[in-house]
Image (cartoon, helix red, strand yellow):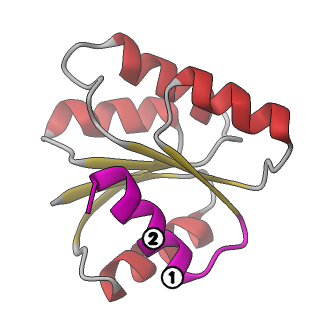
Amino acid sequence: MRILVVDDSTTMRRILINTLSKLGYTDVVNGCNGREGLDRLAESPIDLVITDWNMPEMSGIEFIRAIRANDKYKSIPVLMVTTNAAKDDIVEALKAGINNYVVKPFTPDVIKEKIEAVLGK
């Protein structure tokens, strides 16, 4: 399973990649904003996207809308991991097409639970 992690924070990408590795997910590619995320999607098949919301150039919401607008990518599960915890933000993200939502900070158990939920395990 190949996972794409998109976050403008190098530290947060590293934390997510290390967490995924500990959970047994070692095939991970990453990008620092939505534009790079779209580039990674075009390079090779992706089975799950984990994205932040607040990023320069192309936000997570814009990135998700671009994924959902493309027939090639629209069925890829998307997990948003963000500091945006307001109910309105969660509703907006759901309307944009995310499959699940994690508020930072998170634990590995929460990431595992959310991944399993979006993958139907």
Q: Which mark is residue 113?
A: 2
39, 119: nearer the viewer: 119
Q: Amino acid at mark 1?
A: Asp
Q: Assess disc 2: are there few (<14), some (14-19) or many (≥20) residues with their C-alpha within 10 Å of its C-alpha.
A: few
Q: Amino acid at mark 2?
A: Glu
Query: What residue span does the magenta drawing correspond to?
Result: 104-121
91, 69: nearer the viewer: 91
Position of residue 111 relative to residue 120, above or below, is below
Residue in view at x 28 percent, y 54 percent: 120
Name, please, the residue furthest toward the bottom: 22
Q: What residue is pinned by disc 1?
A: 109
Q: Is residue 27 magenta?
A: no
Q: Main secondary structure of the magenta part?
A: helix
Q: Are marks 1 and 2 in contact (CB under 8 Å)?
A: yes
Question: SS for tag 2?
Answer: helix
56, 49: nearer the viewer: 49
